[in-house]
Image (cartoon, rainbow, N blue to C red):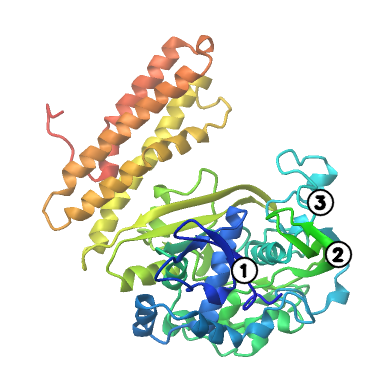
Amino acid sequence: MNLTYDPWIPVRRADGSRETIAPWQITEGIAINPIIAVASPRPDFDGALTQFLIGLLQTTCAPPDVFTWRKWRREAPTPDELRGRFAAVAHAFDLEGKMAFMQDYSPAELTNELEIAALLVDAPGENTLEQNKDHFIKRNGVARLCPACVATALFGLQTNAPSGGKGYRTGLRGGGPLTTLVLGKTLWETCWLNILDTAHYLGGEGGKDGEADRFPWLAPTRISEAKPPAGITTPVDVHPDQQFWAMPRRIRLLAEDLPAQALCDLCGTASTKVYRHFVTHNYGVNYQGFEHPLSPHYVKEARPNPIHPQPGGIGYRHWLGVIENSADGTRRPAKVVERFRAQSQEDGRLWAFGFDMDNMKARCWYDATMPLLTVPEGMDSIFKALVEHLIQGADWVADVLRGRVKDALLGGADARGDLSFVQAHFWAVTEVTFYEHAERLRAGLSVPQAEVPVIESWRTVLRTAALSLFDHYVQAGDFDAVDPRRLATARNDLAKALASKKLRELLGLPQPTRNAA
């Protein structure tokens, strides 16, 4: 199977119908019944396949300037145009052969044979299986994959690779990176909105221009067994395209040709070619120092570090650093998000997703959308400061709420118990209202003091949500075990905090005059 011209990507069209397409067919029927999104059997596969398409377009169709980018956004290229562009790299996208897609150039060196399920980032690891701790994701659930699903799983692992033991390298963005994409109305628009023009993509790099500098499986692997810095691969060592085709894991798929068709354990497709095992070896490419265009980053020791999902999910509390630069400049959105906001005077939607990893263990898959609000020229810093006040206030209230619920139920700071779910619930119930208030702030940017009633309204929202959730969690517990006096004290302390000067300061509100409500 060739991943550029054979159909293997499952999609959904505007009328709800589903089909499997080749990448070059992404614009087929766009004026009548466009393809809306990838429709795979797993949410992480949806994210992986969308990134695959973006990477293929960035590699073969990078516009020389913003004018060309806008032209293709207004009028999508024909399938034949895309097929012609993709043909230039098609030889690097064969799933089998000497230089098989994202597989090691020297298969004889790979001796560790694993079951195919180990390609899935959330599959239980060897230690988990040996200790019989696979309580939630069971062994043997995925024993056989079709070519399309194995290609997706392989790309997903190379893109999101978590730590996997000695010498088993993480992905170019670390294990389980947060990916943020600008969403369009069609799959084509989603992909094209996340393409950078050459000047902003290459960024002065591009001196490494060989095929293997783009597609590392076309040459012997850059082994990373040597002690750093000797075994490290940095942006100056490869072409920027390799950011999309990174190969931290040394893997070779083992295909089996069956006499009769068998069903894929993920998608249910019948095929005579299946994959039940692969071989691997440690010390693949060890990437460091890359600022991937699809991920937000924070700066530490003058080096970009990709942001990763954390417990509690993705939401408006991540606005700073995911949609806007943080106030201190240490967190910045993905390059594609920055470029969209710089060159498109329109609102948009952001799709953020990724695995929350605990070393080599996937705790959860997070997937969320949030609005991208465009503000009038020259007002960006003012709007960002106002939104930051909203988030700072909410963050403080969420922390106070957790503390007072803990006081009521568990009895003080020394009591043990993880109540982080209280904060997560608070963020969730205030999410929609936050975006409404952000839009109201934007609408009043040109009006003096228009933000004050909006932020006062937000303070009321925070107060109402906090008291309601306090009552909910205290009443949901074992009432007989709760000291009524302790409960009353905790609720009173919460109410005082919600009426405090501290909250008004965090929200950027003036302090009330004497006798003011």
Identity of the residue drawn at 55% across and 59% down: 18
Q: Which residue is mark 3?
A: 126
Q: Quarter of the image holding residue 4?
A: bottom right
Distance (Cα) linking label 1 and label 3: 23 Å
Q: Which residue is mark 1?
A: 172
Q: Choose between 457 and 218: the one closer to the eye.
A: 218
Place of residue 91 in the rendered image (x, y in percent of width and height, measured from the top left): 68, 85
Q: Which residue is mark 2?
A: 258
Identity of the residue drawn at 38% across and 15% down: 488
**Which mark is in front, 1 or 2?**
2
**Which mark is in front, 3 or 2?**
2
Q: Can you see residue 411?
A: no
Q: Choose between 54 and 457: the one closer to the eye.
A: 54
Q: Above or below — where is 209 with respect to 400?
A: below
Residue 392 marker: none
Residue type for callout 2:
Leu
Mark with earlier residue (1, 3): 3
Task: Check disc 1: other Cα within 10 Å, few if <14, some if 14-19, many if 20+.
Answer: many
Residue type for callout 3:
Glu
Place of residue 460 in the rendered image (x, y in percent of width and height, measured from the top left): 26, 34
- Secondary structure beneath label 3: helix
Place of residue 297 in the rendered image (x, y in percent of width and height, measured from the top left): 49, 64
Please indicate whether residue 62 sits to the left or right of residue 489 in the image: right
Q: Looking at the image, do the residues carrying marks 1 and 2 touch, with CB atoms under 8 Å apart? A: no
Q: Looking at the image, do the residues carrying marks 3 and 2 touch, with CB atoms under 8 Å apart? A: no
Q: Could you tell me which quadrant the C terminus lies in?
A: top left
Q: Can you see residue 308?
A: yes
Identity of the residue drawn at 78% across and 40% down: 133
Mark with earlier residue (1, 2): 1
Mark with earlier residue (3, 2): 3
